[in-house]
Amino acid sequence: MKKTMVLLCTLLGMAFTVLAADPYLDKRQAMVEHDIKGRGVSDQRVLVTMGRVPRHLFVDERQRGRAYADHPLPIGEGQTISQPYVVALMTEALNLKPSERVLEIGTGSGYQAAVLAELVKEVYTIEIRKPLADMAEKRLHELGYRNVRVRYADGYFGWEERAPFDAIIITAAANHIPPPLIRQLKDGGRLILPLGSTVYSQTLTLVKKRGERLNVEQIIPVAFVPMTGEVQKGK
Ligand code: SAH
């Protein structure tokens, strides 16, 4: 009887520690089951990662209670962190291997970069707004992500010194694919972006580079904040 009580207390203590360490564990698991797996994302590594990364720590304290809901959230500077399903879908479409190197354009909160960092060897991410770049860099460091580099720049030009990349993900809407990014993609590499010229709706588009050829696949309609800087000039 005494032994049972001790065991019970130990188990309760462990459960309490886990919950205290991460009070959003249940909400996050529900998000994975319902909003992500429930909509057809099936890559096991992506599902496990979405269940691990603490999304609530990438948003403002006042937004934490809404961090696992099925929609985008404001992250300051008029920008948004994408809906969890869209993050998972884009990540799955890139078909990433642990040994790979990925470039992200549009760091924002750093959440997508953290998801990528769990799945690949190195992540390079570029943000055009300094306050967001600084905040994301600090946050990723505090959370222990050592394989992510953040740069404050216009992502249109990519990251020449670190190229070529196995995969590139653009998380802001563009009306064309910046040519420097195509050049910085490896042969056999994958690039995904919300492609379109309207503010309210774009098409999630997956591009595969095969030598000089680009294989283009349209996935679903999406709504992202616009990519700014060079991409908006002239075109
Ligand atoms: N991936 C982010 C959300 C992206 S929101 C996350 O997980 O939180 C889109 C981001 O792209 C914004 O932060 C915006 O400032 C940035 N952005 C827009 N144009 C850009 C450009 N030309 N280069 C780099 N970042 C850009």
Image: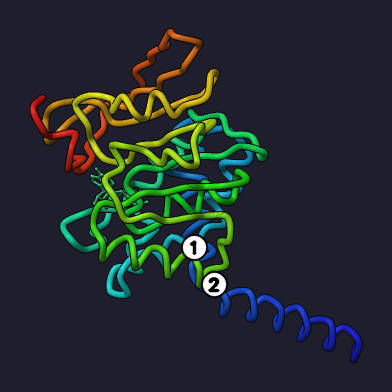
Q: Residue at x 44, y 34 (%)?
A: 168
Q: Residue at x 26, y 66 (%)?
A: 131
Residue 154 place in picture, x, y as percent: 26, 45
Q: Which mark is residue 22?
A: 2
Q: Quarter of the image containing the N terminus?
A: bottom right
Q: Depth check: give the residue in front, 67 or 38.
A: 67
**In the rendered image, which quarter is residue 67 located in?**
bottom left
Q: Is residue 177 above or below residue 48?
A: above
Q: Residue at x 17, y 31 (%)?
A: 201
Q: Depth check: give the residue in front, 186 or 28.
A: 186
Residue 111 place in picture, x, y as percent: 42, 55
Residue 209 place in picture, x, y as percent: 47, 16
Pointer 2 and pointer 1: residues touching (CB < 8 Å)?
yes
The local crowd at label 1, few if under 14, some if 14 to 19, many if 20 or more residues have their Cα within 10 Å, is many
**In the rendered image, which quarter is residue 170 located in?**
top left
Task: Provide the residue designation for mark 1.
Answer: 54
The alpha-carbon separation of the residues under discs 2 and 1 comes to: 8 Å
Most extreme residue toward the bottom is: 2
Q: Residue at x 54, y 72 (%)?
A: 22
Q: Which comes before the other along the chain, label 2 or label 1? A: 2
Q: Quarter of the image containing the C terminus?
A: top left
**What amino acid is labelled 2 in the image?**
Asp
